Every structure is written in structure tokens, then in C-alpha cells.
């Protein structure tokens, strides 16, 4: 067992949990959830991630890690407060049912599986590059924290790439407290208690929240998540993944949890050569990823406060540096095939932009842009061939 397998799983959990927890809390607050309900919802979704990632990775021997729907949380956080927490839970249940239904729709799974590797890698590179650039954006705001950590990363990576990010994690935590940049810590550590929420299926909430949440989750999370696996050389079992995430979403929804889906950003940390040089052994990150999320689910209330104490600059730096190597790998794969380079670059540029239409993020539109370029190239090639005849 390589240490990098465990380390990358831990980094993926820290990045995924710490960098987007605030959005999850804001979404629950927008629905009027109490503090106890928020802690319960966070713990329940952590348990859902632990179960789904562990099962899928062991079952398919692929590093299939799952996450909560960050775009979905942002969508909910932007609501006007007219939807209650119980109505939100009803919407979550409806979305889980829709995902399960989608698992049995062959046209969708075939569509995802047929996305060219260059497009998938271009999309991944476009997503990752924003996180890497964010490191240097944060350096302007917190140079005493970010610049030493970046220097440490370069030094350690030159000797041992597997330990570079974990060194940043350890040293950065000490530096955060040394610079007095941390927020208040929780007074005590205790186990989380789950709170069952009786759902309310309000027609307005189903149309106004469940429908867009389903579309955003599929387009901005599951599609990029499958593309990440394809870009890393794997063939994702889409039907199985949708079935498992749909079931775990259904179970956790009754405790106020947002939808579970395939991870994209954190998946990139677990699927690259830094995790393990042998691609057939990277699946072992899944069980460790699940184990760390299981720990988070047990101490959800305290850990919500603990992660909230870490500054944004620190979380962004860890995320960006952890994703530097996956960015290199994705860009290499995207530009490998000369015939598909323009399509791959179109995908990368659109994905890296801030484009958002109909509540759907740039990753989805980046894939469409790349496919459009491929389609136009094929059309033009066909016209030239006909004229030549």
C-alpha cells in the first residue's frame, strides 16, 4: 500500500469538505433549517458519501469518489426563502427518484460514455485551472500564508511528490494558527445526533427547486464527474453510479441532506498518477476516502465549526496545489491527439470561463462547445470529400 493512496484520499476529503462547506450551510439556512438540522444534514450526507464511494470503488475497481452537489447548494442558497426546510427535503427526495429513473434510461448513459477523451480531458483541465490560478489570487490577499506554502510545496515535490500536499496541510495548519488567522474553535467534541425531517411535497417547490436541482446536478456534477474518469483513462459504469448515488441521496434526504453525485474536482485528486503509478490500483483511494467521510459523519457538528475556523486562503491553496498535477495530466491528454486539439481547447476555454446559462455552469457548456467543433469539423470534412469525388 502506497502512502500516496491514503494521503490523496485525505486531501480530497479536506478539499471537498472544507472548500464548499460554507455553501452547504448557506443552502440549509436559506430553507430555514435550525442549527441542529444543519449539523444533521451535513453528517448524513458525509455518511452517504462514505457508503457510495466505498461501494462503487470496491465494486468496479475504479477510483469512483462521490460528493455533494455544490452547484445545487449554490442554487438553493440563492432562493428567496419562500421554500421551507420540509419542502426542500421533499424536493431532495424527488431529485433522488429522478436520478434513479435516469439510471435506467440507456440513451443518457450511452451519451455520457461516447464523449471523446480529448473533450473530457479539456473539460477537466478547464475546471482545474481555475483552482490552480486561485492559489496566486489568494497570494495577493494573504502572502505570508500562501507564498511560504507554495515554496514548501515546490521543495518537497522535487524530492517526494506524494508528500508535497500533505506537507502543505501540516505546515499550513501550524502557520494559520501562528499568524492568528484561524477563527474560534468548538468548545467541545461530540457525536452528531441525526434529526429526521418529515418531507412536504409542495408542487411549487417540486417545480421551482427539484427540477432545476436535478438538471444542475446532472449537467454540472455527474457529467463532469464521469468525464473526469474518462479523461483519466477509465470507463465509468454510469448506470451503476447513478443507481448508487440515487439510493444514498434518497436515504440521506430524510435527514435534510442535499443530493449525492459523482465528484469532479476531488475525483481529479484521486485518479491521477500521483495517487498511484499503476492505474489499476488507484481504486484503493475510494475506501480510504469513504473512511475519512465516515469520521466526518460521526463528528459533523464539531467539524462544521472546526473547518469553518480555517481561512479561505488556506483551503484554496491546498486545493490548488493538490490539483496542479491533475491539471498537467488533463492538459496532456486533451492535446495529445492533433486532430482534436482545437475542440479540446474550445472545451477548456469555455469551461474555464464564468459562463452560466439557465442555471447550468460552464463545464456543461464547455463539453457542448467541444462537441460542436468536432461536429463542424466532421461536416466540413464530409463536404470536402464529396467535392473531391
Image (cartoon, helix red, strand yellow):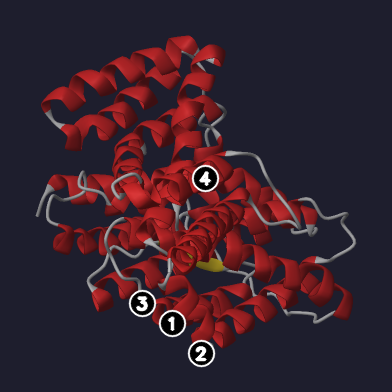
Report if the CB atoms under discs 2 and 1 are less than 8 Å apart: yes
Alpha-carbon distance for marks 1 and 3?
Answer: 6 Å
Alpha-carbon distance for marks 3 and 2?
Answer: 12 Å
Alpha-carbon distance for marks 3 and 4?
Answer: 27 Å
Q: Locate the C terminus by quadrant.
A: bottom left
Residue 248 position in % (x across, y down): 50, 76
Report if the CB atoms under discs 3 and 2 are less than 8 Å apart: no
Alpha-carbon distance for marks 4 and 2?
Answer: 32 Å
Which residue is at a point 42% across and 33% down the rendered structure image? 320
Which is in the foreground here, disc 4 or disc 1? Answer: 4
Q: Mark 2: which secondary structure?
A: loop
Report if the CB atoms under discs 4 and 2 are less than 8 Å apart: no
Q: Mark 3: which secondary structure?
A: loop
- Residue 352's image quarter? top right
Q: Which of pointers 3 and 2 lies earlier in the amino acid sequence?
A: 2
Report if the CB atoms under discs 1 and 3 are less than 8 Å apart: yes
- Determine which residue is flagged by label 1: 239
Residue farthest front in this picture: 389
- Determine which residue is flagged by label 4: 346
Q: Which of pointers 2 and 1 lies earlier in the amino acid sequence?
A: 2
Image height of 170 relative to 94, above or below: above
Tag of residue 237: 3
Q: Which of pointers 4 and 1 lies earlier in the amino acid sequence?
A: 1
Which residue is at a point 88% across and 54% down the rendered structure image? 80
Which residue is at a point 46% across and 25% down the rendered structure image? 135
Q: Which class describes the residues within 10 Å of circle 3: few (<14), some (14-19), or many (20+)?
A: some
Q: Nearer the viewer, residue 78 or 254?
A: 78
Tag of residue 104: 2
Which is in the foreground here, disc 4 or disc 2? Answer: 4
Report if the CB atoms under discs 3 and 4 are less than 8 Å apart: no
Amino acid at each position: 500500500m502506497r502512502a500516496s493512496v491514503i494521503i490523496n484520499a485525505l486531501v480530497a476529503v479536506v478539499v471537498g469538505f472544507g472548500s464548499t462547506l460554507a455553501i452547504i450551510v448557506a443552502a440549509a439556512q436559506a430553507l430555514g433549517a435550525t442549527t441542529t438540522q444543519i449539523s444533521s444534514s451535513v453528517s448524513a450526507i458525509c455518511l452517504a458519501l462514505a457508503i457510495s464511494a466505498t461501494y462503487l470503488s470496491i465494486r468496479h475497481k475504479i477510483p469512483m469518489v462521490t460528493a455533494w452537489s455544490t452547484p445545487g447548494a449554490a442554487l438553493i442558497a440563492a432562493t428567496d426563502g419562500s421554500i421551507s426546510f420540509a419542502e426542500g427535503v421533499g424536493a431532495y427526495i424527488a431529485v433522488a427518484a429522478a436520478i434513479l429513473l435516469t439510471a435506467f434510461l440507456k440513451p443518457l448513459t450511452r451519451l455520457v460514455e461516447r464523449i471523446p477523451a480529448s473533450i473530457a480531458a479539456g473539460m477537466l483541465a478547464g475546471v482545474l485551472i481555475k483552482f490552480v490560478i486561485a492559489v496566486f489570487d489568494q497570494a495577493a490577499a494573504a502572502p505570508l500564508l500562501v507564498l511560504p506554502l507554495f515554496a514548501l510545496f515546490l521543495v518537497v515535490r522535487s524530492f517526494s511528490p506524494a508528500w508535497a500536499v500533505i506537507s502543505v496541510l501540516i505546515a499550513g495548519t501550524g502557520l494559520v494558527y501562528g499568524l492568528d488567522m484561524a477563527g474560534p474553535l468548538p468548545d467541545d467534541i461530540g457525536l452528531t445526533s441525526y434529526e429526521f425531517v418529515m418531507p412536504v411535497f409542495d408542487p411549487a417547490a417540486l417545480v421551482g427547486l427539484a427540477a432545476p436541482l436535478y438538471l444542475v446536478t446532472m449537467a454540472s456534477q455527474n457529467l463532469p464527474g464521469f468525464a473526469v474518469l474518462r479523461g483519466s483513462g477509465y470507463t465509468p459504469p454510469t448506470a451503476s453510479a447513478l443507481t448508487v448515488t440515487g439510493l444514498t441521496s434518497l436515504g440521506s434526504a430524510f435527514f435534510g441532506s442535499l443530493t449525492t453525485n459523482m465528484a469532479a474536482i476531488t475525483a481529479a485528486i484521486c485518479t491521477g498518477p500521483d495517487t498511484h503509478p499503476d492505474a489499476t490500483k488507484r481504486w484503493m483511494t475510494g475506501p480510504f476516502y469513504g473512511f475519512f467521510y465516515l469520521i466526518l459523519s460521526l463528528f459533523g457538528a464539531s467539524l462544521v465549526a472546526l473547518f469553518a475556523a480555517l481561512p479561505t486562503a488556506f483551503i484554496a491553496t491546498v486545493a490548488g496545489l493538490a490539483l496542479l498535477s491533475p491539471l498537467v495530466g488533463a492538459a496532456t491528454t486533451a492535446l495529445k491527439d492533433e486532430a482534436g486539439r482545437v475542440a479540446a481547447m474550445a472545451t477548456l476555454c469555455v469551461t474555464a470561463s464564468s459562463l452560466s446559462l439557465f442555471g447550468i455552469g460552464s463545464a456543461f457548456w464547455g463539453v457542448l462547445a467541444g462537441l460542436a467543433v468536432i461536429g463542424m469539423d466532421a461536416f466540413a470534412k464530409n463536404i470536402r470529400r464529396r467535392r473531391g469525388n
